[in-house]
Image (cartoon, helix red, strand yellow):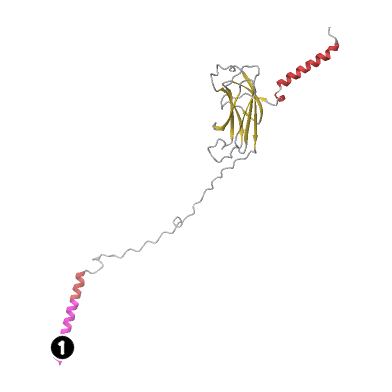
Amino acid sequence: MRSRGHLPGLFGGGLVLVLGALSLLSPAAHGARRVEGGGSFTDAPVLKEGTYSDTIRLREELFYGIDLAQGQQLAVEVKAIGKPRGPLSPTATLQLQIFNPLRDADIDFDLVSFTGADTASVRVKGKRVGSDKDPDSVYAQPGTYYVSLKFFTLLGKEKASDIAEEEYRTRIKLRVTGAAVSPSPTPTPTPTVATPTPSDSPTEAAAPAPPAPRTGGDSSSEPSFFSVSLVAFLVGAIGSFLLTAGRRLVRSRA
């Protein structure tokens, strides 16, 4: 039978072990939340600003999403924690890059050697969303941006690498700066009312124009040329007769 004098020591040692185990299991103790990166854009977890922990193997490319509004800027830092007593690979490399909502890659990226034995860090800082006037810029529109962490070898066959079967812990820190700015709404075009012109205004019916004067003769209402000539001849003949008769009468009286 154990002496009671050993119970406080045993109890104290057990308490230390329990607290130590809880500290290892609690992500808050390390300030990082556990997350699993997606193998493509479509299954990438959409995260908030903060620190996360994950694991990565050789030949993997992991994706993480984060929503950015206009005026915000993303900075990413990833640390890969090596195994000092594990295998080494002098050509293993980590690559970190940012993609826009259309999944176009930013030109800038960070590339660093990670042998598997030491701790390596990669950092990328994007531009402010909406600050570039170029509509083709990858930072032109707000939306879900993506972070890509790729682990590969520059030379040799990856399957034959000494670290091909190893799994390494990563620490991902996402930091968002800048105040979110609501995009300016597109003004609704005001419908324009056409101003009626004088030609468009209703006018009274114009009075009919008087008929044009007739140019042709009408036998039923106007004398013909023959009739006029005959009358003129008769008038002239009678006048001549009367004039001659008058002269003779004057001579005979004289």
The residue indicated by pointer 1 is 249
Q: Nearer the viewer, residue 74 or 18?
A: 74
- The residue lying at 76 percent from left, 17 percent from top is 18
Q: Is residue 210 above or below residue 68?
A: below
Q: Is residue 88 magenta?
A: no
**Quarter holding the C terminus?**
bottom left
Q: Is residue 248 above or below residue 133?
A: below
Q: Residues within 10 Å of mark 1 (few under 14, many from 20)?
A: few
**Which residue reaches farthest bottom?**
254
**Which residue reaches farthest top?**
1
Q: Is residue 8 above or below residue 188?
A: above
Local secondary structure at mark 1:
helix
Q: Is residue 148 visible?
A: no
Q: Amino acid at mark 1?
A: Leu
The region drawn magenta spans 234-254
Residue 98's spot in the image, x, y percent? Answer: 58, 31
Q: Is residue 236 magenta?
A: yes
